[in-house]
Image (cartoon, helix red, strand yellow):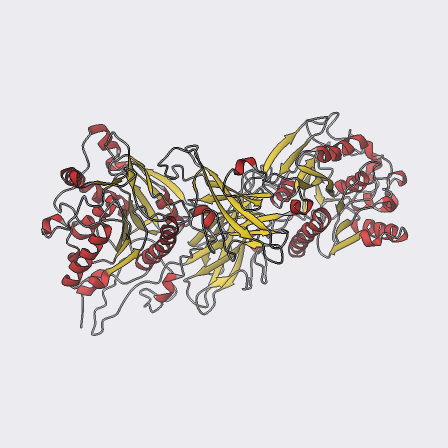
Amino acid sequence: MDNSLQRVKLSVHPSRALVDEEFVILVQNVPPGSPMTLHALHCSEDGHRWEACGHYIADSSGSINAADDCSVGGSYLGVEPMGLLWSLKPVPGSKPGLRMRKKDVQTPMVVAISVFNGHHSEAFVDQVSLASWVVERWYMAPGVRRIPVTEQQLTGTLFLPPGPGPFPGLLDLWGGGGQLVEYRSALLASHGIASLALDYLTNEFTTQTGKMVDNQYFETAYRVLQQHPQVLGSRIAMLGLSLGSVFTLKMAVYSPVVKLRCAVCISGSHIQPVSGGPQEMMDLFTRNIEKINFSEQNEVIWRSLLLPVPSDPSMKADVGRLRCPLLLVVGEDDQNWCTQESAADMEQMMARAGNDHLLTILSYPETGHLIEPPYTPHTPSSMYRGAGVDQKMMVLWGGKTPEHSAAQEDSWRKILTFLKKNLYGGSDPQAIHRSHL
Amino acid sequence: MFRSHVSVTTIRQVVEINTKHRLFSPGKLTPGKRIVGSMRWESSTRPAPLLTATPVRTLVDEQTCIKASFLPSNHPVTVCARMRSDEGDLWQSFAHYNTNSSGMFNLNSDHSVGGSYSGCEPMGLFWSMQPAPGEREGLRLRKKCVESPYTVQISLLEGHVSPNQDPGKEVAAVTAERWYMSPGVKRQEIRQNGLVGTLFIPPGPGPFPAMLDMWGMGGGLPEYRSSLFASRGYASFCLAYVGHKDLPGPSNTVNVGDSYFKAAFQFLQEHSQISADRIGIVGLSYGCYLTLHTGTLPGVKPACLIGINGPVGSSRELLHVNVTTKKSDQDQVFWSFDDQGYIIFKQTSLPSNLHPESIVKLEEITCPLMYIVGEDDLSASSIENADLIEKTLRAAGKSHLFTRLSYPGAGHLIEPPYSPMSRASFWVIKPEKLMTLWGGHPAPHAAAQEDAWRKMLAFMELSLRR
């Protein structure tokens, strides 16, 4: 091996960071103008290997800075400081339809970053890297407390930010896959919002009795959050993805108990049987099952299930009655839900009702359904099993990796800004009605 | 990096609902206070005070920036840091600041006006920590388990208070983690060929430059400097030579000789992930003598040597093979005591008190040598030894190899930066424990540690990588 290349220096700062933080990758002491490959390798919790690579050309001082320099090949192109993370894909030979999701949020995601001589896109295992660095990506900041919640038949986990509190609160709902997914709540708590991740489909009550919970389940969760000594009862928000957004809107509009400061709906819809709960929503899907389509690769496309947008007011949440700010995040290539059509309809309803000043729509081209915290791999399709369903099927979520990853980064930042603006500051939305002029 | 205060700066037009100086109070917060009157106010409360440390997970030798915002302007506040050592002792520090007109303060630019340190000290909260009142006496902070971090709770209190007397309410807090190992560093316990030590290897294929790392007569196996070297890309082997259960013979004598230290150096040379011609040696206190001695053994060709506050030979009456920590009549000749009865070892290592046959033949050194002096070292005659090294090397025409760093106000224990120092602590000495005076004062010693560490790493970079 060329002796001069042995002293290649690779550094990644910070080497321990939150999942949504940027890092800087710096390679030094490389012959000027030489082609180098940056490579990332991650072994997920379920034992699968994911990798990504970027092709760079060293500058005249013999260094490469991934934040300034362009990748000219590999799994991502252009100036992408975090490209090695968001373009991670399962290594060749892996099972099809994998999706990376961290179950244990108390341990970090460990990624090994290496630099290789020349431009390579495969067979990294057979080569010896010039230098290597390991980074840890954490979902929990130091001091965040993880508290399982099982009272009143709830199945959830509360994450409290570090410090004396009290903190604004948030109810965090995921979609039709069910399970108790904690990582978004852990991240939100790392940003100062006490977050309760709630399982409403595969919770203990449902798995034991076989019956779905009703709308009161969400109200109970809201109350538990509201009454927690370290949560500010009057500053609670709700965030839902996919099916979770259905119940977020239901609570925001109709619940006499739930009083939200603001709501965020990602890749969701307001189309739902207004007077029903989770069971009625599932029945609606079942009734429309013939509306599913298939892609050329036989992946299931569910986006037409709820279309066309109904005009019957009992079949969609009346967002014209909303009294709190609402943020909608829309992926224009969402193949799983009719997010775009729903957002357009919601905008019209709110314009007619005169409360559209409360609405913000973030719409991202070439972006799919699973809009998640940034710098984690994009899943265009995966093997998916709906809650309560026996069969797994290959579902198409949509989106193209570079655009989807940019959307994840941008939307997360804007979601955090929106939440903090409404939870940490802002005037009481109820005050509108108390004019003393 | 997503800062929680960035977005909320747009909502600065606020009306303070309660009394002027009351900060965000816990308990029921009623939003949108109803103001009865002829004018309609847009009312809201100021966002809660926010304390951040960036980055929040760092290596021990990295700086972290502590800032606070959303406080009343020109207001007195106290920042307090607390952590527990591996043994469970509570260490703490605090400092008094005044917020600026925007209600913020930043440890990187603002001055402490009281507390454990004063002036502008970005890392002051960390290096000025002392055992909390009521904790055990004579403590010295040393990390035993390098694989776990120190968890430091940093809190913000209202007013200029002393956390122990009248703490008041904690208004904001942040938890920071300080790590001795970066991700991917491998730790291997070495017990082969009679060697007793721990090897730290950086992540990656290698081969890496390496350091042989030795400490003083306190014995045991402190790993924290080696783990930091490995976190900076240098394989590092910390070697035990006295006071360790896996070493032969009684634990209060040095029972290993030249062959042991030579074997340690060769172990590094023969390691598949280490470059045989890029190995340096570093030692503190008696380890400094061993560094110089090993570095001049026949067949040992180090690429650099670093000595910190240590002698160039062993004390007069004993050869290095049998130096004992046991108190004996001969030893005591050179010991002195201060008013509190703390022992001062300084005279023991005066060049004139060293056994002439043990003095290292410095003129035979062929590699760069860095010697670090704490001018207030009360445990070793560092200045005199440094003078001797300088004189010897100049006479041999090798002064271009010599670098001397000298720090006024710094004591004996010049360690990795941003760690608390102890001017005196209990040191294991049989048959009874004595409080040993190391010397040094907190602020100059902290500055010395920070500067010395940076220069040591730069010296290693130059000697081991180019």
Count the numbered circles shown.
Answer: 0
Q: Position of residue B40 (x, y in %)?
A: 22, 71
Q: Nearer the viewer, residue A306 or A282?
A: A306
> Which image quarter holds the N terminus of chain B?
bottom left
Locate residue A245 relative to residue A103 in the image: left or right: left
Q: At 80% from the left edge and 42% from the top edge, which residue is drawn?
A: B292
Locate residue A231 relative to residue A19 in the image: left or right: left
Q: Position of residue A130 (x, y in %)?
A: 60, 43
Q: Position of residue A435 (x, y in %)?
A: 18, 68
Q: Position of residue B174 (x, y in %)?
A: 46, 51
Q: In which quarter of the view is residue A102 placed?
A: top left
- Can you see residue B138? no
Q: Nearer the viewer, residue A263 or A24?
A: A24
Locate residue A181 relative to residue A25 in the image: left or right: left
- Determine whether B289 is above or below A326 in the image: above
Q: Residue at the bottom extreme?
A: B38
- Can you see residue B108? yes
Q: In which quarter of the view is residue A58 placed?
A: bottom right
- Determine whether A367 is above or below A201 in the image: below
Q: Residue at the front extreme?
A: A296
